Structures are given as C-alpha cells and as structure tokens.
Amino acid sequence: MYGGPDMWTAPLLLLAVPLLPAAAAVAITLFRPGENTSARLALWSTAASAMAAMAVVALSSRETVEAVATVADGEIAIGLAANRVGAVLALLTMGVGLVVQSFSTRALAGDPRAPRFFALTAVLTAATATVATGATLILVTLAWMLSGLVLLSLLNHHEGSEPARRASRMTGRRFALGDIALAVAAVLAAASVGDIDVRSQEATVEAMAATSVPLGPTDVSMLTIVALLLVIAGISRSALVPLHGWLPATLAAPTPVSALLHAGVVNGAGVLLVRFAEVFGAVAVATHLAFVAGAATVVFGTGVMLTRTDVKGSLAWSTIGQMGFMVVQCAAGAFSAALFHILGHGMYKAAMFLGAGGAITAHHRARLRPPPRSSLGRVHRMGVAALVPAVSLALAYALLDPHLSPAGHLLVMLFAWFTGFRLLTGWLAAAPLGRLASTISAAAIGVAGTVAYVGGLTTFEGYVNAAMPADVPAAVTPQLVAGTLFGLALMLVALRWLPGALGLASRRRAYALLVAAGTPSRHQTQPLPWRRL
C-alpha cells in the first residue's frame, strides 16, 4: 500500500481525472459564460485532468490506485480503481479530449452553441474516463449509459439539421439495445452474487458459474448470461455487424464530434471486454460470438472502406473494420494486443478526422505534382509489397517475442503484414524516388515499421501483463483463427481469379454490393417499421 503523502495523493489524483471535466461542465451549465470562457474552462480542466492521469499512470506502475468506498462487511460500494490498464485508458481519453477541445476553440469560433458543445464534451470525457476506471460493474454501466446519452446530444449539435437528427435517432436505437443488455448484466450479477468488483473478478466468476438459471429445458449459468450480455453491449457500442449502421450515419456531425467518437467512444467493446476479461474469457459461447461478429465486421467494413471515395466515409468504414479486428483479438485472448490496438487507433483516428479537411487540399496538390520519374509494373509492386512485410515479420520475431497466445500471434502477424502491404503498395505506385531508390526505400520502411510495431507491442505487453488474466480458458483456438483466415483467403482468391463471364459478373456483383452498403440507405431518409434497428 502507499504510505506517507501517497496515501492521500494517489486517490485524489484518480478522483481528479473524471471530476475536473465534470466540474467544468457544471460551471458552464450553471453560469452560462460566453464562448471563450466556456472553451477555457473545458480546455484547462481537461488539461489538468490529463496531468492527473499521467501521475496515475506513474503510480499505477507500482500497484493499483484506488479511491473506493466500502460497506460494513468490507465489500466495495462505489469508487474508482486504476491498474495499469485503466490508467492508460484514462490517459488516452484525456489526451484525445484535450486535443479535440483545443481544435474546437478554432473550429467552432462564432458558433452560438459552442458553450453547449464544450460542456457536453467535458461530460463525455469524464464519463469515458469513469468507464475506464470504475471499480464496479454498476458504476461502469452508469458511466457507459451517460456517455451514450451525451454523444447523442453532440450528434445534434447543428440544430435543425435533418441528417443529424436521423443519425441521432438511429444511433439511439442501437445504443439502447446495448445499454439495456449491459444494465441487465449488472442487475443480474448484483442480484445473484453481488456487484462485480473489477479489481478481483476470480471469486465472482466462480460464484456466477455455480449459479444456474432455468431457461427452457436446460439450466444456464449466470456467468454465461452475463458474459453474453457484455458481448452484446460491446457489439452495439463498437458498431459491429449487424448493428454497424449507426456509425456511417454520424458523418453529419461536426468534425470534433467525429474525432471524439472514432477515437474514444467507439472503442467501447474493447474497453469493456478488456476490463472484464476474466468474466468474458471464461465463457466459450461469449468468446465465439465475439469472434464471429468481429470477423464478419473486419471483412465487411474493410471491403466497404476500399470502395469509398470520400475522406470521412472511408475513415468511418475503416473504423468499423478496425473495431472488428479489436474484438477478434479479445476473443483470441490477446487482450494486451487489443489494448495496444485501442491506443494506436484512438490517436490515429483523432488525427485523421481533425485533418480530414486538409486531405482534400493534399489530394489536389498530389494531382498537380509531376508524374513519377520511373513507373513500376504491377507485378513488381505487388511482389515487393507482399514480400517485404513477410521478411520483416520473420526478422522482428527472431529479435522479439510479444508473449501472446498462438491465436494472438496469428492476428498480430496478419495485421502487420496487411498494413505493410497497403502502405508499400501506395508508396511503390507513386515511386517518388525512381524505380531502384523507391524499391530500396520500401524495403527499409517495411523493416523499420514492422520491427517498431512488434517491438512496441512487446514493450507494452510487458508493461500491462500484470493487469491481464494469466489464462483465458475459453479463448478461441488458433485452429479456428487459422481456418477462418484460410477460408477468407480462398474466397478472395476465387473471386479475384475466377475466369470467364462468371468471374467478371461475380466481381461486379461484389463491388456493387459493397458500394450499395456504403451508400445511405432508404431507411435513413424514410424509416421503415421493420428496419428500426
């Protein structure tokens, strides 16, 4: 335990993380200051909260930082607890919130609804930080529901915008399904074995596994029900198939809201499953449901993203695919890799959305540049782009070991290879340095990037390993992961190389389906009773 000044300093710093932005939101709501004052209140409170989160990260490296209230028998009533995982997630939340609010002071200059925006973003960062550090399932559930409600209000920032209202209604229906599932999980767990203490879940898992509920002709353990409800809540919040439609619809929201959504709120499934890893990882039905939903989302979201021509639309569908991959990692028991993915995706997507306007200018500038001095053939580009990441991965694994499960290794290697392939394909297509120099530089970029990724994952895994479950008994097997990847590869190869009129018709049909899926559907403009979800 902490002694001396740390006995009070550590809990106060942890409480400051969500309370400072919340206090700023209350001040803006009660005193109704002008735009500039509201911006300063939100910005400086989030900056102070971010510094407190940095201190909590440092303190949590020694032991879990706690600020909890207990009842007479010593059981936890309410409070916050940040181990290395929670502290890192809280720092990410505050860092993204700080950047977005700083951007918004310029982007919303002169907007009469700017004070409302800054108050709501302060509440959203506070609620999201509470989801990351709440010590009990009930508190996490309340913060989860609050963050969803605030996001719905932010989506309606442009008063009178019909697309924004439609997006808010659609998002609200999806969120309601997940929120109800999470609330039922919290109530059932509390009624059967008591509120789940995030700090020590092992005893709760055993108690829920021993508690059965009659459902039809068979009995189902309370553990299975709660784990499945956690997965449903994650599917809803992270826009996984089949509840994915709300995320592309939110493109009508202001850019700062999109940045907060894609960098923070949409990571909900990963945060929830990582924080309750011992509950989720003990139920095979839950891990396999998450795997199926995640795998389907990866294929569908990535496919639609590749057909999009608009910047924000491409980013939105990219997020859907990335969320699917994150959940697949959780299902495989690679929680440290999933958390590493959450951090990287959050920072990357915040930067991409805040810079989306500049992407159009960059595109026009690229069109005005002179053509490359030496074009590279398609076979040359594809061969180098495929070979370099594979060799780089072999080198990285010879030097480093991320200590993941076998299924986790497969997923990490797939992600590293595919990312490298996409990056090098674009680089070699531009060939800005000529044929030979572009090929050599592609090899250097591939090796450096892959080793940096595997090295960063290994370092991060070593840091958070103490806060992760040592064993995930119900994780999906590497055989299932490998079989799924092999089946997808066969399907793509068959679609690409199927000869004759049948092959051409199949490719055109697949492309048309992906384009249609990424286009606003009829029920977004004229809601149909049978497509409410």
Image (spheres, grey):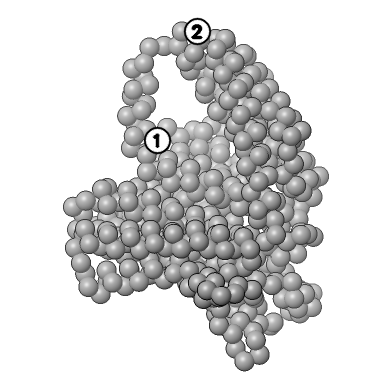
Neighbor class of circle 1 (other Cα within 10 Å; few <14, some 14-19, many 20+) is: few
Answer with mark 1 or mark 2, whichever residue precedes in sequence: 1
Left or right of 356 on screen, residue 185: right
Q: At 69% from the left edge and 51% from the top edge, which residue is drawn?
A: 462
76 and 273: which is toward the camera: 76
Q: Is residue 415 above or below residue 280?
A: above
Q: Is residue 383 left or right of residue 152?
A: right
Q: Residue at x 50, y 49 (%)?
A: 346
Spot occupied by residue 180 in the image (x, y as percentages of width and height): 54, 71
Do residues under tags 1 and 2 come within 8 Å of each other at their CB atoms? no
Q: Position of residue 233 (x, y in %)?
A: 57, 63
Percent coordinates x, y for residue 227 in the rendering: 68, 67
Question: Please, which residue is most extreme toward the top here?
Answer: 374
Q: Residue at x 50, y 61 (%)?
A: 55
- Tell me where residue 207 sits by quadrant: bottom right
Q: Amino acid at mark 1?
A: Asp
Count of numbered badges drawn on the protein: 2
**Circle on res. 252:** none
Q: Amino acid at mark 2?
A: Ser
On the question of residue 219 being in view, the answer is yes
Compared with residue 29, is residue 354 higher up or lower down, i.e. above or below? above
Mark nearer the viewer, 1 or 2: 2
Give SS at disc 2.
Answer: loop
Which residue in the structure is indicated by mark 2? 374
User: Who's the residue at 68% across and 28% down the image?
Assistant: 392
CA gap, disc 1 and disc 2: 29 Å
Instruction: Residue 435 in the image: state x and y as whole percent.
Output: 54, 9
Which residue matches tag 1?
A: 310
Q: Is residue 124 visible?
A: no
Considering every residue shown, the one lying at the far bottom of the view is 72
Residue 266, compared with residue 56, is above or below; it is above
